[in-house]
Image (cartoon, rainbow, N blue to C red):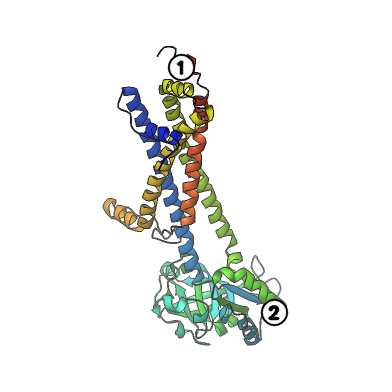
Amino acid sequence: MNLPYEWVIGLRYTRAGKRSNRNSFISFISVISVAGIALGVAALIVVLSVMNGFEKEVTARMLSVVAHIEIFDARGSMPDWQAAAREAARNPQVRGAAPFAETEAMLVRDDTMKPAVIRGVLPAMEPQVSDVARQMREGSLDALRAGSSNIVLGSALARALGVGVGERITVLTAAAPAAPGQGGVAGLLPRPHTFTVAGIFEAGHYQFDSTLAFVHLDDAERLQGVTAPAGLRLRLADMDTAPRVARELKRSMTGELVMRDWSRVNATWFAAVQSQKGMMFIILAMIVAVAAFNLVSTLVMTVRDKQAEVAILRTLGASPGAVMRIFMVQGTLVGLLGTLIGVGLGVAVALKVDAIVRFIEHAFGVHFLDKNIYFISEMPSDLLWSDVARVGGVAVLLAFVATLYPSWSAARVKPAEALRYE
């Protein structure tokens, strides 16, 4: 294949020179530039993959407990929830529906007191909308029977209270005072209820494992002093369609209903993750930029070293644009080589990051993720080829931009002056 002479000369300039110490030094700087770009690209791919893994893993664990859509009646309760469930089921995306009631309470065991969210469910229907039944570590969700005063606790919550299956705890809920002036600071009286721990679940999401408890729907209504569930929880075939399905249900279902999908319930968390990913991309892209702009010094030195050859090319009829293209080819190839090495290294590490982290933890006796602080305790990774393409494109673009000034400087070389002392 016959390449343009600018490409041929540019390719020759990228090879290591052996004629002088100066050529060797320029080649060494080129290697450093390639290594810098490769490490920057690899770091960016690995970090984005780990952040994608965190988001995917936490979302999966979150949605094992949180419904895809929650439907509330504007009146405060939903007595005819069966009819509402039948209406919701007409949407082809809806795969399951179950009623629920929810209240906040304090759980007390001896001298230990922990806040919790008490969720009332129907054990027979709950598997249609959550994975709690499969996440039971001790006991069974079926032990929640109407009027039994049984309760299922999250694993971290049970550890904090120091209780196991079969032991009793006190649940304190707020109740209006019987007479004016008898309430506390907020005008409410604590109302104690005794429950027996019938099971312990572990969702793998510390926020839920440490604050969530389940009781039978009838017991939850008794805690709240109501006679109907608060609303419906739905599970969809595709969780990403939840906002659209919520709008469709709002139009198709009767009554004054309030729809809340999982992305709105956790909107703050998802917004924070996206913001962090964006900032991390910018910060690590600056590392790639620093490495890419090392090419400026490399090419400037190359231009100074090749002035006589550039002058000869000009006298043979090469245009300034052709001279620019020679050095642009050289710099872009160096950037492309660094990008390809970085992409290969980054993809390899991102695909095996969990094994690498486990090896480091075992070798040095450290633990990177404490599940008491983070939502998960293992290092996840989710490699997206769109991220790889974006990182590679940015790296090559920065390398190309770094070639512009040195190439323009080479095009301005005056043949007579360059050859005067040759």
On the image, the x and y values in percent for residue 116 come to: 52, 69
Residue 306 visible in rendering:
yes
Going by the image, does 227 lie left or right of 152? right
State yes or no: discs 1 and 2 in contact (Cβ < 8 Å): no
Q: Which residue is pictured at 28% across the width and 50% down the height?
A: 364
Closer to us: 13 or 370: 13
On the image, the x and y values in percent for residue 159 come to: 41, 68
User: In the rendered view of the protein, which quadrant contains the N terminus?
Assistant: top left
On the image, the x and y values in percent for residue 271 come to: 58, 57
Q: Residues within 10 Å of mark 1 (few under 14, many from 20)?
A: some
Q: How far apart in space, not on screen, are marks 1 and 2 (Cα)?
A: 81 Å
Q: In which quarter of the view is residue 13 placed? A: top left
Q: Secondary structure at mark 2?
A: helix
Residue 190 visible in rendering:
no
On the image, the x and y values in percent for residue 40 come to: 43, 43
**In the displayed structure, would residue 301 be above or below residue 273?**
above
Going by the image, does 19 lie left or right of 271? left
Of the residues shown, which amino acid type is indicated by label 2? Ser
Q: Which residue is pictured at 53% across the width and 27% down the height?
A: 320
Residue placed under numbered mark 2 in the picture: 252
Q: Marks 1 and 2: which is nearer the front?
A: 1
Residue placed under numbered mark 1 in the picture: 418
Of the residues shown, which amino acid type is indicated by label 1? Ala
Closer to us: 383 or 171: 383
Q: Secondary structure at mark 1?
A: helix
